[in-house]
Image (cartoon, rainbow, N blue to C red):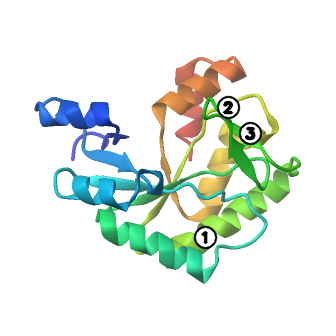
Amino acid sequence: MDRPLLGANGTEAMQALLAQGDGALVDYLKVGPFMGREAIAALAGRHPLMLHLDDTLSGPHAPSAGLVARLNGWIQLTGTPWTSEHIGFGVPDVNLDSALITQPASALLARQTAMTHIVRNARTLRGQLQAPLLLENIPFFPNLAHMHVCEPDFVNEVIGRSGCDLLLDLAHARVSASVFGLDVRAYLEALAKA
């Protein structure tokens, strides 16, 4: 392959474009448990899928055997060549608000504590999932949930210590660069060190 692989969210709009023969550069539809088994099963035969999970890697406990079994079930359903998780948050617990922005549901973790939790949990999943685990950069919204984890050097250290590869979300990178007051190319160059 002479270009990066491109995934797009498996939304109804993207599915309609693909059904019309558009979207030739889309290699994978990004799907997740939030869509439900039936919807994912219907897509699985029509287009290659990439599984995106929604677990919080910054939590204080390593993933349980039950969680790993559940995630491997999603991997089998999708036939995904990789699975991804958001890199984690600056807090151990989060909620989504009505605008679908991640909000803190617990106190801010010290930078090193967040790093330790994320690396441990990513390593645990990487060693037990039936597909390689990628860690996705998240957009920097100025709240405690996003502290530390959008900084390029934090991302690079997590990637290096966890043994996972980076799933680059370009829209998330643009948001983070803007909030940090950086040119998006400078932000991407800093992430490219991962």
Disc 1 and disc 2 in contact, CB within 8 angstroms: no
Near-viewer residue (28 or 102): 102
Residue at the image position 88 percent from the left and 51 percent from the top: 110
Rendered image: mark on residue 101 = none
Q: Amino acid at mark 3?
A: Gln
Three-letter residue code for mark 1: Arg
Residue 130 vertical placement versus 29 (above, below): below
Q: Determine crowd level at label 3: few under 14, some 14-19, many 20+ residues with C-alpha closer than 10 A.
A: some
Dot 1 or dot 2: first in sequence order is 1
Q: Is residue 2 left or right of residue 150?
A: left
Q: Is residue 142 above or below residue 79?
A: above
Q: In front here: 35 or 49?
A: 35
Disc 2: CA contacts within 10 A as few (<14), some (14-19) or many (>=20): many
Residue 23 in view here: no
Amino acid tagged 2: Phe
Query: Which is closer to the viewer, label 1 or label 2?
Result: 2
Disc assigned to residue 123: 1
Q: Position of residue 166 (x, y in %)?
A: 50, 50
